[in-house]
Image (cartoon, grey):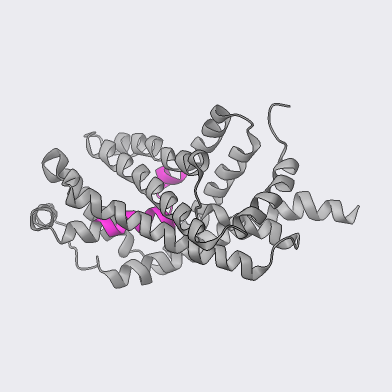
Amino acid sequence: MNFFSPADVAKNYINTGKGKVNTPIPKMIILAILAGAFIAFGGVGATTVAVSIPEASLGKFIGACVFPGGLTMVLLAGSELFTGNCLLTIPLLEKEIKFSGMLKNWVFVYIGNMIGGILVGGAIIYCHQASLFSNAMAVSVISTAVTKCSMPFMDAFVKGILCNFLVCIAVWISFAAKDVVGKIVGLFFPIMMFVLCGFEHSVANMYYISAGLFAKLVPAYAQAAADAGIDTSALTVGNFFGKNLLPVSLGNIVGGAVCVGCAYWFIYLRKKKEQ
């Protein structure tokens, strides 16, 4: 076969996971910063193209087709992404890593991802890239951030589950491919679907909301948002963490670690131990 079977992917991920957990913390953080930046650039590209298309539904679709470039860079260039690393439950259940090791990876990778996302968010705003299309991009950035910070807790939580189910399936399919083209094609559709459906990805939101917060501080951008009728009162640092990142991150863990990681461990690895 020119691809790995699902059972092979589950088996191969055990060593992959052990390598992730055993990566020295400084390297882990740098790899995580890169991943946060890669996902952020996917978001920048998706927003830029969507704003340039008058028809909103078509713009959203095209933007969703651009965003998978972020995960492509994560998986092929080499980096550490919190949402993908939710699959570490596989080697954990195989008793090949400890819970403390998995938790260490999640914490430091999450922090690194946030640094990468915030750095790109700040750079995009302060290099005036958001002034494209007569500040229409800035309006879109602020509007997106406001929407994410205004979401009810359970909505954000469930959308986080749905999102990372698809993200981890995308990662899983990419691991099945044995060539670069196969990996890119395999990850494309699940990622495109989660963006198109408006599900919530914690690492992407580290960029989207931080960019909105930075844009809110620029008078020209804030005025453009006000002229568009956008109320930015909900766009605060407190809501960034409390109303979005907290429920979305918890949902991402359930969607990736439980719905994909635990499910595939049960199907492909636990069964073998019973034979």
Q: Nearer the viewer, residue 84 or 133?
A: 84
Q: Quadrant of the N terminus?
A: top right
Magenta segment's dominant SS is helix
x%, y% of residue 177?
Answer: 63, 33
Q: Is residue 228 left or right of residue 111?
A: left
x%, y% of residue 131?
Answer: 14, 44
* Residue furthest right in the image: 275
x%, y% of residue 17?
Answer: 64, 54
Q: Residue at x 70, y 35 (%)?
A: 4
Residue 201 in which image quadrant = bottom left
Q: Is residue 208 left or right of residue 33?
A: left
Q: Residue at x 24, y 51 (%)?
A: 123
Residue 209 among magenta residues:
yes
Determine if residue 95 is in view. Answer: yes
Determine if residue 82 is in view. Answer: no
Residue 133 among magenta residues:
no
State the extent of the magenta-drawn residues as a range: 192-211
